[in-house]
């Protein structure tokens, strides 16, 4: 290392403590980073020797206190640089400390003093100025400042039943230093393990051991950091007094048929009740309420597992919850139990329904039609489901007439006499008090009529005011109807107390809240609840439903007041609709809140209706495909594993123009050829059909073009396929041969099956074989020859046919009988054919044994594409024939030889 | 207040009232009624009584687990073998007359000694237990039993009785007799738990009895106060 090098480079070794500090603190400056470089050097070789050092090494200072550091230079260094303590200057965080704070103690030592340290983290370096200009760092320390811990306060512990004890405390002021809190606990006779508060939760700790109830434990907290250690006040308690029990569970509510105002709660206490007494809090509220009422705690101050709540409203749903704690109040309340609800039993209706009548004109003389009308009771008065209303009518001295009505009105034909009508509402438990109404006689005249009846609107309601008569009044009945051009006067009424002389007409104060019950693609079923009687303020005459899309006009539908459901039809699918409803009484209507819904894109089951058939169709297609593949597996097999012709089996000898290719013109041969109707095209040629003719011509032309372009990549041997012995193909092969081969060797084109997949044939696919294998030299040859010999006698054309068959069925695994069956099915089966068939079967049999070997060889082709060329070529060429008819697209290159063959049959 | 009581003639009723008021005024200062003062052995006896019941509850579940761990026939409900081995275990059963006539000191001493022995044996049991869960429950029970010992010692100290000193060399240890078969060892374990249960039942009675005995002083304080007042 050089001493006279870069300014500000450290020329000192860093003590291990400094190392530790550095690790602890965030490295912010390059100096600190540089330090590490030196540090490692030091640790490796100990090459560095500090020029001096600072004392103290790693100070932790209390904020606000004074601090003095001393830098001591080493003699060696002083000699080398010609410096002494006077040359020392200090820097804090790269800023030079004013000289006033320095004190030169002696020749080697200089100190610096800081008063009232306020920074948390100070990097202090001791430097010397050498040669009057170069500043060099001698040593560096980091001063960490903070505060000693404060005494932890508010230590408290909680024992969650079944869990371990957890204590928490207030840690006091921020210390800016790493402060450890340790919870200590002991019995008079035994100490327990300390509980170290975790770094992220320094104000609480959960002890390791399960608490022992009924034995006092002493607990305190120790807070400790670099600046000090303090202990909290000790607390001494019995863990049972800090317990938070588990909440009671299985809370259930049952009602009583005898008393409609009570509900009985039962629950299961937590297991802690076996050794402590519990007290409870039970809270309840009606289902719709948000605030809880509490049962007086003194009623639930002892261990119990049931409680009967009284003074409840009949036929009302109440929700309950319960919690418990130690009966003496020491400890903590448990959490609230799960809520449970129950409905009090029904009681008889507490009030008689509001009752009124309307006399309607009647045509019958001496009678009048009286419509008795009444209002339903609100739930808090009905105290149950109103089953029906009982109406009695009494005429003077005549017998009672009884009616039982479900509706809220009754029309009766009465005489002109005075009647007394009573009305009671009935529920499961009993009947309400009776509302009594006097229907005066026809000729009745009120003696003290109400005067000065006035009506005026105020605060959005219609007020009615009148002057009371002098006599005392039991009650007033206010009757009104809406004056409308369209509607007849539909009277409504309200009863007022006898002392009142002004009131307002009550129109509904709330609109119904509409919601969707079911939303379909083109329709939506809306439903709503009947407006509570409290807000009806009259008879709901009808509802109006307004609905609209975001852009569309609002459509209104009037619905009878007896409905609570309506179906909107002819909606558009996948559209957002906004719907709101108004309830109308005679006084007016009130809108309810708006509700939006979106019609789905598809009706219910529509997707299924689409998906299921598609899936089925797909399945069916797949099945059919599989079946088809299974049926045509031989065809596919040929397609995938093409039969490569074996050059050793190529019958060049029979290729001579002397051997007429007549067998190809025999339709029966094709029929026998393994059911491979691809050869039908040949038949068509024979029949002089024009179409295949032209096709063949085209393909020939195509081939010719190809031939030019591929420049003999498809060799002449392609033309000499298993069944072809056409002149043109020979000539083409001859051309190739003459062009490229010597007389002793033949080049074959190797076409692997990849070529059939319409892939661009690579060089490998058409690579020329360097094989010098003689064409006619083959081990399998004798068999073929033998076969030919066998058939030679029977028919002149048979040998070719059989040879073809042999090749075509080389990898046939289907039983021989299949050929037989197929031939039988043929329409033109004759004796001759049958004979031929037999022979064919023989040849099949023989060729099968060959075929397996050839197949095996062929399968190896892709890896060694020049392997067994002759065989491959043979199979290949055969396959070409097989697939010809199946493919009506432009023929790939690999098919070209076949095209040539076909062309070979054409007259040229 | 004394002069008021000494003048029965004039203002007798006023004097009585004044006296009553003074007595009421001084009530909070009476040490026996003052909660912050030394509560005496009463609360600690109550606590020890609660502890025995808590331990009994704890032992019930522990014994169930442990007997299942021992396997049949020990975990069968009607298994009731005659007490043959386990002679070193302190016996809880005692003649009723003898028990009733026990002095407080002797009663507490017997309890203390019994639990010190049982605790030692139980610690041996803990070492043998195979499953971690069982060891945990046993360890917690040992700690609780240790607490009970401390609690009894506290009561004894409050009543001014010395703690019984264990005779040197007789420190009981739970060392399974190598001659014992596995079954007999299990039998020892069974008896240890059974004896513990019996002891806890007995202790509950002991401390209930002590508790009742310690209650009268509170009433005496009230009487003394009345005598002082008038």
Image (cartoon, grey):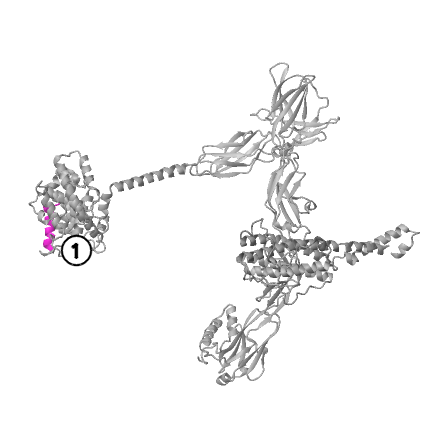
Position of A176 relative to A405 (above/below): below
Query: Is A345 a magenta residue?
Result: no
Answer whether residue A906 is visible to the viewer in this image: no
Q: Nearer the viewer, residue A116 or A471?
A: A116
Outermost residue toward the top in this view: A365
Residue A355 in sight here: yes
Q: Residue furthest right?
A: B9
Chain letter belonging to callout 1: A
**Near-viewer residue (B96 or A174):** B96
Vertical relation: A499 (above or below) A694: above
- The quadrant the N terminus of chain A occupies is bottom left
Instruction: Please provide percent x and percent y for residue A518.
Output: 48, 36
Q: Residue furthest left?
A: A658
Tell me: residue A173, above or below residue A524: below
Q: In the rendered image, which quarter is residue A865 located in?
A: bottom left
Q: Residue A47: image x %, image y %?
A: 45, 79
As helix, strand or loop, the secondary structure at mark 1 comes to loop
| Percent of width and height locating residue A45 | 44, 78
Q: Which residue is found at the position 51% from the left and 71% from the top?
A: A20
Residue at 64% across / 14% down in the picture?
A366
**Along the viewing direction, whichever of B186 and A402 lies nearer the viewer:** B186
Which quadrant holds residue A346?
top right
Quarter of the picture holding the C terminus of chain A: top left
Position of residue A64 measured from the top left corner of the image (x, y, whole percent): 62, 70
The number of numbered badges drawn on the structure is 1
Majority secondary structure of magenta residues: helix
Q: Which residue is mark 1?
A: A768
Answer few, some or many: residues within 10 Å of disc 1's Cα (few below 14, many 20 plus, some between 14 and 19): many
Q: Which residues are magenta?
A: A724-739
């Amino acid at each position: 290392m050089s001493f006279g090098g870069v300014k500000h480079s450290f020329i000192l070794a860093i003590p291990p403590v400094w190392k530790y500090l550095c690790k602890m603190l965030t490295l912010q400056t390059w100096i600190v980073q540089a330090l590490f470089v030196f540090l490692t050097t030091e640790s490796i070789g100990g090459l560095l020797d500090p020029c001096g050092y600072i004392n103290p090494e790693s100070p932790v200072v209390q904020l606000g206190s004074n601090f003095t550091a001393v830098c001591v230079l080493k003699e060696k260094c002083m000699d080398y640089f010609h410096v002494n303590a006077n040359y020392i200057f200090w820097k804090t965080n790269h800023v030079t400390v004013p000289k006033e704070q320095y004190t030169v103690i002696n020749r080697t030592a200089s100190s610096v003093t800081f008063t009232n340290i306020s920074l948390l983290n100070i990097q202090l370096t001791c430097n010397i100025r050498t040669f009057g200009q170069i500043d060099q760092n001698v040593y560096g320390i980091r001063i960490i400042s903070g505060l000693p811990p404060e005494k932890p306060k508010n230590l408290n512990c909680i024992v969650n039943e079944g869990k371990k004890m957890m204590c928490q405390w207030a840690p006091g002021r921020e210390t800016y230093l790493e402060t450890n809190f340790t919870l200590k606990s002991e019995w008079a006779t035994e100490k327990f393990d300390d509980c170290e508060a975790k770094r992220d939760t320094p104000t609480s700790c959960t002890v390791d051991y399960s608490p022992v109830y009924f034995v006092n434990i002493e607990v305190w907290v120790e807070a400790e950091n670099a600046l000090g250690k303090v202990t909290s006040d000790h607390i001494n308690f019995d863990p049972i007094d800090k317990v938070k029990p588990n909440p009671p569970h299985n809370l259930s509510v049952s009602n009583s048929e005898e008393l409609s105002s009570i509900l009985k709660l039962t629950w299961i206490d937590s297991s802690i009740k076996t050794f402590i007494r519990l007290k409870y809090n039970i809270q309840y509220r009606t289902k719709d309420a948000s605030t809880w009422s509490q049962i007086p705690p003194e009623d639930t101050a002892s261990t119990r597992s049931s409680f009967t709540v009284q003074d409840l409203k009949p036929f009302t749903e109440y929700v309950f919850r319960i919690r418990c704690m130690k009966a003496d109040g020491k400890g903590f309340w448990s959490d609230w139990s799960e809520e449970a609800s129950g409905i009090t039993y029904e009681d008889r209706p507490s009030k008689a329904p509001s009752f009124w009548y309307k006399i309607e004109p009647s045509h019958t003389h001496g009678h009048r039609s009286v419509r008795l009308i009444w209002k339903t009771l609100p739930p808090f008065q009905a105290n149950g489901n109103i089953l029906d209303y009982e109406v009695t009518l009494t005429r003077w001295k005549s017998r009672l007439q009884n009616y039982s009505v479900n509706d809220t009105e009754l029309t009766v034909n009465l005489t002109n006499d005075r009647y007394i009508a009573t009305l009671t509402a009935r529920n499961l438990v009993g009947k309400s008090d009776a509302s009594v109404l006097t229907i005066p006689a026809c000729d009745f005249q009120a003696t003290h009529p109400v005067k000065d009846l006035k009506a005026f609107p105020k605060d959005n309601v219609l007020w009615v005011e009148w002057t009371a008569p002098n006599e005392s009044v039991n009650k007033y009945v206010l009757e009104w109807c809406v004056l409308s051009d369209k509607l007849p006067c539909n009277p409504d009424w309200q009863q007022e107390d006898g002392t009142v002389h002004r009131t307002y007409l009550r129109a509904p104060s709330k609109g119904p809240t509409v919601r969707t019950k079911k939303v379909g693609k083109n329709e939506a079923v809306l439903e709503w609840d009947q407006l509570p009687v409290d807000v009806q303020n009259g008879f709901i005459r009808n509802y109006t439903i307004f609905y609209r899309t975001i852009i569309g006009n609002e459509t209104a539908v009037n619905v009878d007041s007896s409905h609570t459901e309506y179906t909107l039809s002819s909606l558009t699918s996948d559209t957002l609709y906004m719907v709101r409803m108004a309830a109308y009484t005679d006084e007016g209507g009130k809108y309810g809140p708006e509700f939006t819904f979106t019609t789905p894109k598809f009706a219910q089951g529509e997707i299924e209706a689409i998906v299921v058939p598609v899936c089925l169709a797909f399945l069916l297609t797949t099945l059919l495909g599989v079946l088809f593949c299974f049926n045509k597996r031989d065809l596919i097999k040929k397609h995938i594993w093409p039969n490569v012709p074996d050059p050793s089996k190529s019958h060049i000898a029979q290729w001579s123009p002397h051997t007429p290719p007549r067998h190809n013109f025999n339709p029966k041969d094709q029929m026998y050829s393994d059911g491979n109707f691809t050869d039908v095209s040949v038949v068509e040629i024979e029949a002089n059909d024009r179409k295949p003719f032209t096709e063949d011509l085209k393909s020939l032309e195509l081939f010719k073009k190809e031939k030019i372009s591929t420049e003999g990549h498809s060799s002449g041997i392609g033309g000499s396929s298993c069944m072809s012995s056409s002149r043109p193909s020979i000539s083409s092969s001859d051309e190739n041969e003459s062009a490229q081969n010597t007389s002793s060797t033949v080049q074959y084109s190797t076409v692997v099956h990849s070529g059939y997949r319409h892939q661009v044939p690579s060089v490998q696919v058409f690579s020329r074989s360097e094989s010098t294998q003689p064409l006619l030299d083959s081990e399998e040859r004798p068999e073929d020859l033998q076969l030919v010999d066998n058939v030679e006698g029977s028919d002149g054309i048979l040998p070719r046919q059989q040879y073809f068959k042999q090749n075509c069925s080389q990898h046939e695994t289907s039983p021989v009988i299949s050929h037989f069956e197929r031939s039988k099915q043929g329409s033109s089966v004759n004796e001759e054919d049958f004979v031929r068939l037999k022979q064919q079967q023989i040849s099949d049999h023989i060729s099968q044994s060959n075929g397996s070997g050839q197949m095996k060889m062929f399968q190896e082709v892709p890896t060694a594409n020049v392997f067994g060329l002759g065989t491959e070529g043979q199979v290949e060429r055969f396959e070409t024939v097989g697939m010809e008819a199946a493919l009506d697209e432009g023929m790939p290159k690999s098919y070209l030889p076949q095209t040539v063959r076909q062309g070979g049959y054409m007259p040229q | 207040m004394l002069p008021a009581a000494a003048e029965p003639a004039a203002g007798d009723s006023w004097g009585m009232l004044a006296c009553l008021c003074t007595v009421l005024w001084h009530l909070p200062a009476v040490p026996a009624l003052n909660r912050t003062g030394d509560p005496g052995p009463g609360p600690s006896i109550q606590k020890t009584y609660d502890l025995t019941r808590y331990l009994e509850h704890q032992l019930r579940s522990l014994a169930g687990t442990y007997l299942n761990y021992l396997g049949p026939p020990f975990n069968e409900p009607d298994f009731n073998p005659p007490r043959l081995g386990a002679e070193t275990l302190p016996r809880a059963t005692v003649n009723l007359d003898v028990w009733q006539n026990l002095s407080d000191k002797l009663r507490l001493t017997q309890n203390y000694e019994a639990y010190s022995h049982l605790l030692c044996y139980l610690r041996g049991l803990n070492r043998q237990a195979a499953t971690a869960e069982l060891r945990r429950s046993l360890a917690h029970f040992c700690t609780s039993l240790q607490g009970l010992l401390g609690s009894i010692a506290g009561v004894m100290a409050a009543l001014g009785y010395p703690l019984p000193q264990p005779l040197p060399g007789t420190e009981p240890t739970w060392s399974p007799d190598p001659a014992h078969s596995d079954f007999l060892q299990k039998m020892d374990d069974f008896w240890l738990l059974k004896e513990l249960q019996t002891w806890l039942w007995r202790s509950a009675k002991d401390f209930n009895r002590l508790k009742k005995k310690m209650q009268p002083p509170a009433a005496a304080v009230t009487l003394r106060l009345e005598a002082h007042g008038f």
